[in-house]
Amino acid sequence: MRDRAIFAAFFLFLLLGPFDALSQSYPTVYVGLVSITPSNTAVLAAAEGGFFKKHGLDVKPLILAGSSTALAAMLSGEVSLISIAGSGLINAHLAGGEVVMVAGMVNFAPYDLIVAKDIKKIEDLRGKKVGIARFGGSADFLARWGLEKNGLKPGRDVTILQTGGNPERLAAVSQGAIQATLLEQAFAHQAKKAGLRSLLDYSTAGLDYQHNGVGTTKSFIEKNRDLMNRFMKGLVEGIHRLRNDRAFGFKVLERHLRVSDSEVIQGAYDYYIP
């Protein structure tokens, strides 16, 4: 009788255990993404591949409009982490924010300076308009660097305008609302296919640059060390899957870039995921 009771209890444990595990709720971690771009592929891949869930986290990526918006959301506690270029975190730190970068995902400047068809050289941008995402962001910093390197002073010789993310900037330069903009590789590829020019490839310009990485605050790390360890494990495993499964990487890029052109997707994969 006693053996039957033990067996029944053990059977009940086996029966209920899986349902209890399935009903387990994971801590929700909101990660702000500055824009729709291949630079965020690692975070998206780790989430879609189930690697964060594997380590007990329900990571939800959110698209935020520009680095300043993402930083404000993180500093106010609306999101726990952000995927952002190093320039954005540096500006926040200089302004007194307790921000840190915990992972570098894209460690070069993945931009082209794309110009209208009638612009032959960078000096021709004198008196013209250059579109960026947001002041203080990566495109803003790199646009100013490229202009100044070629003898043009932003604000005096060239007007810099906030015109939105990569898709919006591509549309603006295509329609003539601006004469130049910085576009990340996948969008620059589309621009060149449409007949626009690239006058500067920042990835080969000899500029050491920390582009997208994962940022957060010192206080969040101090209060959530175990969570951060689990997040980093999931992120690293997501990157490993990306590097070793091209089909998976293509699928993630196609879904989030909303581009079906296989040439664009393959180019983005080879460019961002060595």
Image: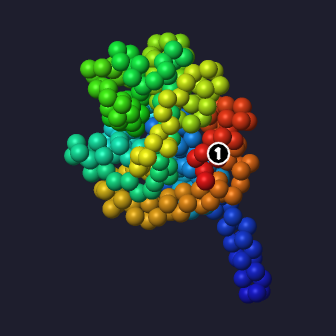
Residue 107, relative to residue 200: is it above or below?
below
Quarter of the image where the N terminus is located? bottom right
Residue at 28 percent of width and 43 percent of height? 92
Can residue 50 be seen at all in this image of the molecule?
A: no
Q: Position of residue 177 (x, y in %)?
A: 46, 13
Residue at 35 percent of width and 41 percent of height? 88
Residue 47, relative to residue 116: is it above or below?
below
Q: Position of residue 78 (x, y in %)?
A: 39, 41
Q: Position of residue 240 (x, y in %)?
A: 62, 60
Residue at 40 percent of width and 64 percent of height? 225
Q: Closest to the observer: 10 or 255?
A: 255
**Quarter of the image where one finds residue 262:** top right
Q: Closest to the observer: 100 or 116?
A: 116
User: What secondary structure is found at the residue carrying circle 1?
Assistant: helix
Can residue 157 be seen at all in this image of the molecule?
A: yes
Q: Hey, which residue is sitting farthest top in the picture? A: 176
Residue denoted by label 1: 269
Q: How is the image coloured?
A: rainbow
The amino acid sitting under disc 1 is Tyr
Q: Is residue 62 left or right of residue 48?
A: left
Q: Closest to the observer: 126 or 261?
A: 126
Residue at 45 percent of width and 17 percent of height? 179
Label 1 CA crowd tier, 10 Å (few <14, some 14–19, many 20+) = many
**Quarter of the image where one finds residue 22:** bottom right
Total numbered circles: 1
Q: Is residue 242 left or right of residue 65?
A: right
Q: Position of residue 24 (x, y in %)?
A: 58, 58
